[in-house]
Amino acid sequence: EDKVVQSPLSLVVHEGDTVTLNCSYEVTNFRSLLWYKQEKKAPTFLFMLTSSGIEKKSGRLSSILDKKELFSILNITATQTGDSAVYLCAVDGSGGSNYKLTFGKGTLLTVNP
Amino acid sequence: NAGVMQNPRHLVRRRGQEARLRCSPMKGHSHVYWYRQLPEEGLKFMVYLQKENIIDESGMPKERFSAEFPKEGPSILRIQQVVRGDSAAYFCASSPRNPAGELFFGEGSRLTVL
């Protein structure tokens, strides 16, 4: 069975701090890894990673994938209170359809003013 | 452009009753996916539907659960004879095509079974 493990499960920081969220996975038929942000509502898409070593960046958020070591990290620099959310990591083990995702339990990030 | 709409947002049922959860995909999206999030667990894939077709139901429990996406109207996830273990958040997602790429999620329906 495919498995995704995220760490830490929760994290509390102050505004301006930089955080790194981790995601490791075991998938038999890996195609891609995705990050979502969930703010008590619908999970919203952040990144999709398919190739090792290529950083994806969007504003203060960035992510990279290591397919050899089977993990990904999500970095958030200069955190703001609006970054407070659950960050979900998911892998597509269905051979590329990107719908049969296996999710981790998420990392709850709290950014205090 | 309205997002994925799910209703009800909260549903309370007693053991043995039926639960019906509805999902209207984003405009222009014809692919619908249901996921379930049990307490303290990650989201788990249940079923993938297109209009009038079930494409992949490999994540659906074998009994009591069914899903449909009729030609007209929303997709419906139906749970018959609910048990306490069905208490969870049920998320619907949609995409304009498959391979899906980014999935667009709804806000979820939280089912509580008393």
Image (tube, coloured by chain):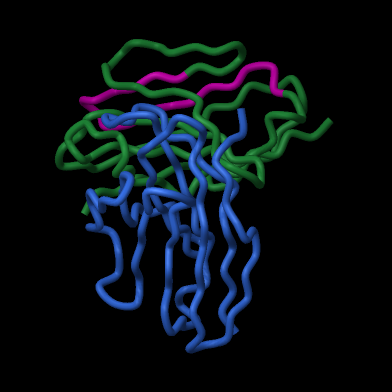
Chain colours: A green, B blue
User: Which residue is nearer to you in this view: A17 or B17?
Assistant: B17
- Name the spot of residue A82 as percent of width and height, x first: 74, 29
- Residue in the foreground of this view, choosing between B31 and A95: B31
Q: Residue furthest front?
A: B72
Q: Residue at x 41, y 46 (%)?
A: A104
Q: Residue at x 28, y 59 (%)?
A: B59
Whether residue B23 is in magenta: the answer is: no
Q: Nearer the viewer, residue B98 or A98?
A: B98
Quarter of the picture containing the N terminus of chain B is: top right
Indicate the position of residue B51 as horizontal and vertical percent values.
Answer: 33, 46
| Quarter of the C terminus of chain B within the rendering | bottom right
Is B19 situated left or right of B35 in this image? right
Q: In the shown orientation, is residue A66 left or right of residue B38? A: left
Q: How many marks?
A: 0
Query: Please, is residue B35 above or below residue A8 in the view?
Result: below
Farthest residue, direction bottom: B16
Q: Is residue B39 visible?
A: no
- Foreground residue among A41 and A70: A41
Q: Position of residue A36 (x, y in %)?
A: 50, 34
A26 horizontally vs A109: left or right: left
Q: Point out residue B16 in the picture as x, y percentages from the top left corner.
A: 48, 89
On the picture, is A75 further left or further right than A30? right
Q: Quadrant of residue A89?
A: top left
- The answer to whether residue B56 shows anywhere in this view is yes
Q: Which residues are magenta?
A: A63-79
Instruction: Identify which residue is drawn at 46% across, 83% down.
Output: B83
- Residue A57, placed above or below residue A4: above
Residue drawn at x 43%, y 69% as measured from the top left = B78
